[in-house]
């Protein structure tokens, strides 16, 4: 027996770890040790099977999950052997592929990655509207097309409504604009590598030779694009292990489809399917409630989960008057429980459906002096105003940072329009220089009118002056020392008049909030510069480092975790508080379907509730020992109190009774029969309840 497959695996897990004869799918419920299979299998591949770390790639969905997996592997494998191992999100792998293969995608290696805000600004320019709802709709339609590998041509052909046709037109020019900017958006990070793998043999061969074993966690949430990437990467050897749980598929709204599970069984006829049945996470009461809820969904695959961690304490359901009372009660309960259970803050998590629920909970925790961290929330350095100001600093420090150039050049507006930037981007791409450099070149004058060039050069010269004052070009010369960073910062802020820009473009309240954030940033930067004697260039590097560290969150402080249900996927906590378990919030039903077709509306309502039910299942199954649900009798929506009712999911948990009788017929099927059943069910497509 191998030395690195330890005793901490049950026979089914062990089978999944040791199986190397072909593609392997572990399809099992929450907390059954799927992720553990992945980490143990990585160790097995490296230590016992002679795989080189650089040939093994494991993919997960969030940075946090990747980090946790990395930590787990490090405890199992000698770090020297694990060196070069890739454990990352689909997106980070995509960035790496794109960087190395930029040439084949018609990109410079220092291509820029636009975030959702940058992308939204481009779409807004094209749509010429400020209607946020419309903008978001177009952006998410384009995103869905990209994730389904549907190009602008096909989108245009298949458009059925006027709205879709417009979105398709925007899609085409949006794509062209990104190309001209030498930029990609978030979706492209997976889409372009997938397309390269499909159409470019050189790229395909290189990566197929590099990735000799692929592991994918949370497989149920892959979309078409990700699936194609997996398919191409594993195309040569069919050596991969995917683990997932169809009952935890919560990203249909982002284009993930369960058909990808079905496709696996047809695309890989030799697929080995392994089932895990023991849950090692939760006490029986919690597991039973979770099973009861998910039972209401049509099943792709019968799962029986059991736990030997004892019955556990009763699940608590509390009704509160409003969200403030709810937040205070959670804070009080956590305080008391920490004391009574002799627990640590980090043993507690508060989970909720929507980001906006976090604010009052944060306030209550702060008032109660309870330390907390927020997952899946916006970090300080991700705020638009912070990114605006930092884009200037980034550009001054590194003028080939094209997205920084675009952001700084257009925020605040200074007469540099989209057409100008597009021409500049094209010219820079042809000349293979940065936007900044291109702005100074004579050749540009043939492409742009003087009135377009003028604001461009004014801006570029302003940046150049700042560079000069910050000490650029002073190396080797004696006379000109860099000016203090604090002074430069003040002058910069005065010159761009960012405060006025905020008050011109926003309502007073948000403008004020943002300006205070900017002051916090510049104050912090100036202090840092003085304390550590940094010049502006060093300061920018320091910020980049801090930003990265914050993203990586090196040390987990002892704090209560606040998280959306989506961001809690794959994680576990001893004590979980699930807030806002109300109709309209969980299930969150969104706007009523605008499409006139009642059958379609009814169908999408049914499938939406199923997805919300899976989300509820994810929430319940995060808890190890205790679970407390709360709902509010009324909740403030847009300054109005709205009467609320408890979520249907609370009743579905069957807390009063012993829960519905379990149907034993399918539990006795052999794995092969079950796979047959899975195939048959998948062929029919998911069934709807009711
Ligand atoms: P999810 O569906 O929520 O992602 P999962 O199936 O990936 O869950 P893991 O996170 O791998 O489950 O495991 C759940 C918990 O059970 C972890 O704390 C893990 O360490 C523990 N565990 C898994 N397998 C075993 C085992 N064979 N013996 C003891 N503990 C185990
Ligand atoms: Mg997992």
Image (cartoon, rainbow, N blue to C red):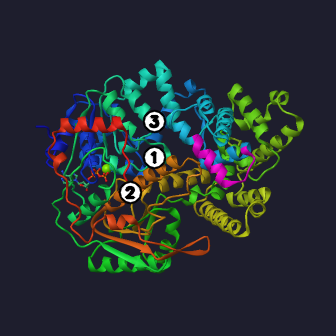
Residue at point 59%, 64% (across, down):
531
- In the picture shown, does residue 619 fall above or below 169? below
Residue at point 36%, 51% (across, down):
689
Q: Identify the residue position indicated by label 1 in the image.
A: 252
Residue sitting at the far right: 450
Earlier sequence position, callout 3 versus callout 1:
3
Q: Is residue 443 left or right of residue 232?
A: right
Q: Is residue 522 left or right of residue 18?
A: right
Could you say which disc has been placed on residue 347 in the image?
none
Q: For the residues labelled 3 and 1, say whether their Cβ atoms are less than 8 Å apart.
A: no
> Image quadrant of residue 444?
top right
Q: Dot 2: few (<14), some (14–19), or many (≥20) neighbours within 10 Å?
A: many
Q: Identify the residue position indicated by label 2 in the image.
A: 613
Earlier sequence position, callout 3 versus callout 2:
3
The segment highlighted magenta reads 127-142
Residue at point 36%, 78% (across, down):
333
Indicate the position of residue 200 as horizontal and vertical percent values: 50, 20
Residue at point 49%, 67% (across, down):
358
Tell me how far mark 1 sits from mark 2, CA to CA. 13 Å
Indicate the position of residue 313 as horizontal and vertical percent values: 23, 72
Q: Identify the residue position indicated by label 3 in the image.
A: 224
- Secondary element under disc 2, as helix, strand or loop, is helix
Q: Is residue 75 left or right of residue 436?
A: left
Q: Dot 3: few (<14), some (14–19), or many (≥20) neighbours within 10 Å?
A: many
């Amino acid at each position: 027996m191998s030395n690195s497959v330890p005793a901490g695996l049950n026979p089914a897990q062990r089978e999944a770890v040791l199986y190397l004869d072909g593609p392997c799918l572990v399809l099992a419920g929450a907390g059954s040790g799927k992720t553990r299979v992945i980490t143990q299998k990585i160790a097995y591949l490296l230590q016992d099977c002679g795989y080189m770390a650089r040939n093994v790639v494991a993919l997960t969905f969030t940075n946090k999950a990747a980090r946790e997996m990395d930590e787990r592997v490090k405890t199992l494998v000698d770090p020297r052997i694990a060196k070069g191992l890739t454990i990352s999100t689909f997106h980070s792998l995509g960035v790496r592929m794109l960087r190395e293969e930029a040439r084949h995608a018609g990109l410079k290696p220092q291509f820029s990655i636009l975030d959702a805000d940058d992308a939204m600004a481009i779409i807004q320019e094209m749509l010429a509207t400020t209607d946020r709802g419309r903008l978001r709709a177009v952006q998410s339609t384009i995103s869905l097309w990209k994730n389904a590998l549907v190009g602008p041509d096909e989108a245009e052909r298949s458009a059925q409504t006027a709205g879709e046709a417009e979105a398709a037109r925007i899609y085409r020019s949006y794509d062209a604009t990104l190309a001209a900017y030498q930029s990609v958006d978030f979706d492209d990070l997976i889409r372009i590598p997938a397309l390269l793998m499909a159409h470019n043999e050189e790229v395909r061969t290189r990566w197929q030779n590099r990735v000799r074993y692929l592991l994918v966690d949370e497989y149920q949430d892959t979309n078409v694009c990700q699936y194609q990437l997996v398919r191409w990467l594993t195309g040569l050897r069919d050596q991969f292990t995917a683990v997932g749980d169809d009952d935890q598929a919560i990203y249909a709204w982002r284009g993930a489809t369960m058909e990808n599970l079905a496709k696996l069984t047809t695309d890989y006829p030799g697929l080995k399917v392994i089932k895990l049945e023991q849950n090692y996470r939760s006490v029986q009461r919690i597991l039973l409630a979770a099973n009861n809820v998910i039972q209401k969904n049509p099943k792709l695959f019968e799962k029986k989960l059991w736990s030997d961690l004892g019955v556990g304490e009763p699940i608590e359901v509390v009704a509160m008057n409003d969200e403030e009372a709810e937040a205070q009660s959670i804070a009080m309960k956590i305080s008391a429980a920490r004391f009574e259970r002799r627990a640590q803050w980090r043993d507690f998590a508060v989970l909720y459906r929507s980001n906006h629920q976090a604010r009052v909970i944060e306030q209550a925790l702060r008032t109660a002096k309870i330390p907390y961290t927020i997952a899946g929330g916006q970090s300080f350095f991700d705020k638009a105003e912070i990114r605006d100001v930092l884009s200037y600093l980034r550009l001054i420090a590194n003028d080939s940072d094209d997205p920084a150039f675009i952001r700084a050049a257009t925020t605040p507006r200074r007469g540099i329009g989209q057409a100008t930037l597009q021409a500049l981007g094209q010219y820079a791409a042809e000349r293979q220089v940065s936007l900044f450099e291109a702005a100074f070149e004579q050749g540009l004058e043939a492409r742009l009118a003087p009135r377009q060039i003028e604001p461009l050069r004014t801006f570029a010269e302003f940046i150049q002056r700042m560079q000069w004052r910050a000490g650029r070009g002073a190396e080797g010369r004696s006379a000109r020392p860099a000016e203090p960073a604090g002074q430069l910062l003040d002058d910069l802020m005065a010159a761009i008049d960012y405060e006025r820009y905020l008050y011109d473009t926003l309502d007073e309240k948000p403008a004020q909030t943002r300006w205070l954030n900017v002051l916090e940033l510049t104050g912090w930067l100036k202090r840092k510069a003085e304390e550590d004697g940094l010049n502006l260039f060093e300061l920018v590097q320091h910020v980049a480092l801090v930003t990265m560290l914050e993203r990586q969150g090196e040390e987990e402080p002892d704090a209560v975790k606040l998280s959306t249900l989506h961001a809690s996927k794959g994680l576990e906590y001893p004590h979980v508080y699930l807030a806002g378990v109300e109709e309209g919030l969980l299930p969150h039903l969104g706007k009523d379907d605008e499409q006139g077709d009642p059958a379609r509306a009814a169908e999408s309502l049914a499938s939406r509730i199923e997805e919300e039910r899976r989300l509820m299942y994810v929430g319940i199954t995060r808890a190890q020992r205790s679970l407390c649900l709360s709902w509010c009798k009324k909740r403030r929506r847009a300054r109005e109190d709205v009467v609320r009712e408890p979520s249907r999911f609370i009743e579905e948990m069957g807390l009063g009774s012993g829960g519905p009788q379990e149907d034993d017929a399918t539990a006795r099927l052999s794995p092969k029969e079950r796979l047959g059943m899975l195939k048959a069910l998948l062929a029919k497509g998911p069934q709807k309840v009711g």
